[in-house]
Amino acid sequence: MTVFGFILKNALRNTRRALLTISSVAVSSALLVSLMTLERELTVPPEAEGASLRIIARNKVSLMQPLPAKQLSAIQRIPGIVTVTPFTYFGGLYENEEFTSFAQFAVDPVPFQSIIVDGPVIDGSYEAWVKNRTGCLVGADTMKRYNLKVGDQMRFRGTFYPCDLDLKIEAVYQGTVDDRNIFFHHKLLDELTGDPGTVGTWYLRAESVEVADRVIQQVNDTFANTSAEVRAESERAFQMGFVSMWGNVSNLIRGVNLVVVFTLVLVAVSTMSMAVRERFRELAVLKALGFQRRDLFGFILAEGFGLSVIGGAVGIGGAWAFWTFSDIQQMTNGFLIVFEVTPRIVGMAAAVASVLGVVSSIGPAISVGRMSVVEGLKTLD
Amino acid sequence: MRGGTTGIEWLVLVGLVAAGVGAVWGLATLAGLPIQYNVRNVLVRWRSSLTTILGIGAVVAVFVVLQAVARGIEASSGNTGDDRNVLVVRRGSQAESGSLVTREHFKTLSYMEEIARNEAGQPLISAEVIMIVSVPRVDGTGEANTLLRGLTARGMELRPQVSLVEGRWFEPGKREIVVAQRLAKRFQGFELGGTVKAGLTRLKVVGHFDAGGSAFDSEAWMDSDECRAIFERDQYSSILLRPRDTNAMTVLTNRIDTDKRLALRAEGEVQYYKGQTVTAAPIKIIAGLLGVAMSIGAVFAAMNTMYASVASRTREVGTLRVIGYSRKSVVVCFLIEGACLAALGGIFGCALARLTDGFSTGTLDFQSFAETVFQFQVTPMLMAKGLLFAVVIGVVGSLLPALRAARIPVISALKSV
């Protein structure tokens, strides 16, 4: 019998226990992977290609405070800006929904075309949307989710604005980080509210990464000490600002992760100590036959390590397969979009599982190393 | 209010625990087993017992703490408002912060005769503005949105649960604000004498108030019209008023709701805040999912321990059977042991979770997009739930091992070493 065969036989001697240990390690590591992915989803917004070029300018008071539309010409005069469009969150409810997970934004379609560069139109035509003031540009995910086609009407009830929208789908885009949002003419919103003088935010595109910082600074300076001071930042920074409001949630998830790891350790340690306790006598025989301490330690370590790594592989692989091949957007009603299990998360969970195998073997191995042969042979259990 | 309910809840908890112990005792007596046998068994194998207890304890602690978070968020909005008050917002808006009410609306409503009056004869109605202001956090992790409410003296009369704890109330026309004490701890410039920049003006903090754990604990207050002036807003956000009596309340609510010209929605203040608990819902779902997933791991751990316990006691089980104990008694015996083990874990977990009771923190409210402050609420009811959860884990985990113990043939059991 080879050493490997010996270890394998030992590990599978109590098949039920081996299976129980593997499955509890598997469940816990699947949980660990899912939680880490959730934390990543909530705290690290997906990175878009043009994100460092795009700049969002909001009212310094808060995002909810509107900006005067007359700022447009002052912004256009700033050198280094390719394009600028008003960008106003409508916050409507789709048809009869109580909660709508995708956003509607009012924009100026012409300059907007050079902002939404990473989302080319895949159906309908952008020009048709530009021409139709009551038309809209819809993300592919939303089209799919509600089973819509170009030419359909979409109705929204306003919650922030005292007006409703009735829009015709003119074009469909795909390829941005969030293909759920829909866009419509800012002029339509102005008409409906009877107020052409305000916009929500400004959406800008800088010529190059090099000038972006200067443009941001200049936008801020232009409106300093006016009645509507502006806070401009890169799209990325803007998203991170949103994320920072989640701060405590991510701490909570991290706390739960710690507890999951802790229970994992307990399960593994108790399994290994049980396995070793059962075979105290055999191990004493092995010692009597002349096996060294480090040989015995090797046997135990290999078994504990093997069990936790198999459990880890099943759990991590299962979680990866589940989150990769299931439609997370459908499941969470559009609350979570990407939910990508990254290699880094897989690596971290795998590291936890391996460390677990080592940690669980140390205690039992020490007690085996310490025991005298006579004492071990006397043991009954 | 809270003291009374928790008193009862504590009684319920003690009652449940007593009932549990009684049930175990009764079962043990029925099975004819001395309960000390099981308790001693747990203690003899203390190392593996301890790991199981710690494991189950950790799972229960997470379960209870997450529920306490959801409860805390619910409580902060569920705890708000006065039964006698009616809140009026624009029809179609989901929250005060997204609502618009014009000055004409306010005028129309002020003259409605169903509105109660104070001693000075003024109608108890307050037109209010909700602003969201971005303020830097104390811990330097960037800015977060906070709610700034502009209200009148009537508005303060309508909210008796809010009391001043430090400094003084704001004076209209002086650009002063009063901040909730709990909110003040989380943001820069909200300390007494501090200033907050809003547009071109600086608002001075002249006092701190305490709102008794209600939603107002996440707000800063200032004068209503001054707030409109500073932020250049023509319209109010909402109107809070108090009808003369319950009868007048029904009449008034109906009248506002059905008047097409107003396009407003009237709702009891308490009901309104009860409806603002969207934020707690996902946390509850996560708590449930985590509870299930983690309990699977815990059940496996308990099973492992109990199988080992059964295996090493094969001879004892054989002896019990020879003396005359039935298979059923043996099953009950091991179930009780598993349940006791898990209950100890549950107690440990609840004790751990209880340490977080009253911990005050903030999170993003999905409806107002501002930070709401809430406190972890580890109530006796939640702890009872946690204990029950632990016992279920224990019983499920020891069921298979117990059945196995019962099936061991007597002769071979006695022969085993």
Image (cartoon, coloured by chain):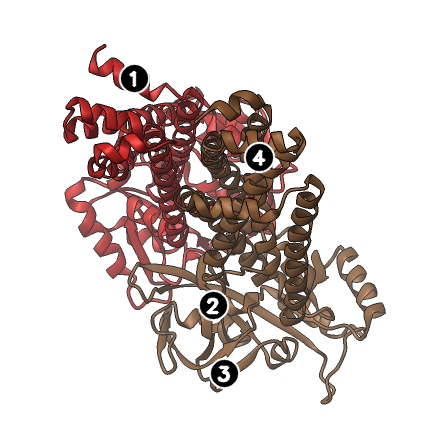
Q: Is residue B130 above or below residue A55?
A: below
Parent chain of label 1: A
Looking at this view, is A263 or B287 the one in front?
A: A263
Check disc 2: other Cα within 10 Å, few if <14, some if 14-19, many if 20+.
few
Looking at this view, is A34 or B383 the one in front?
A: B383
Quadrant of the rendered image containing residue A74: bottom left
- Amino acid marked by disc 2: Glu
Whole-percent x and y of residue A216? 24, 52
- Which mark is in front, 2 or 1? 1
Quarter of the image with the N terminus of chain B is: bottom right
Instruction: Give me the chain that's red.
Output: A
Q: Earlier in the sequence, mark 2 or mark 3?
A: 3
Q: Colour of chain B?
A: brown
Q: Is residue B387 above or below residue A17?
A: below
The residue labelled by disc 2 is: B232
Q: Are marks 3 and 1 in contact (CB under 8 Å)?
A: no
Mark 4 vs mark 1: same chain? no
The residue labelled by disc 4 is: B396
Whole-percent x and y of residue B151? 57, 74
Gap between marks 2 and 3 measured at Cα? 31 Å
- Which mark is in front, 3 or 4? 4
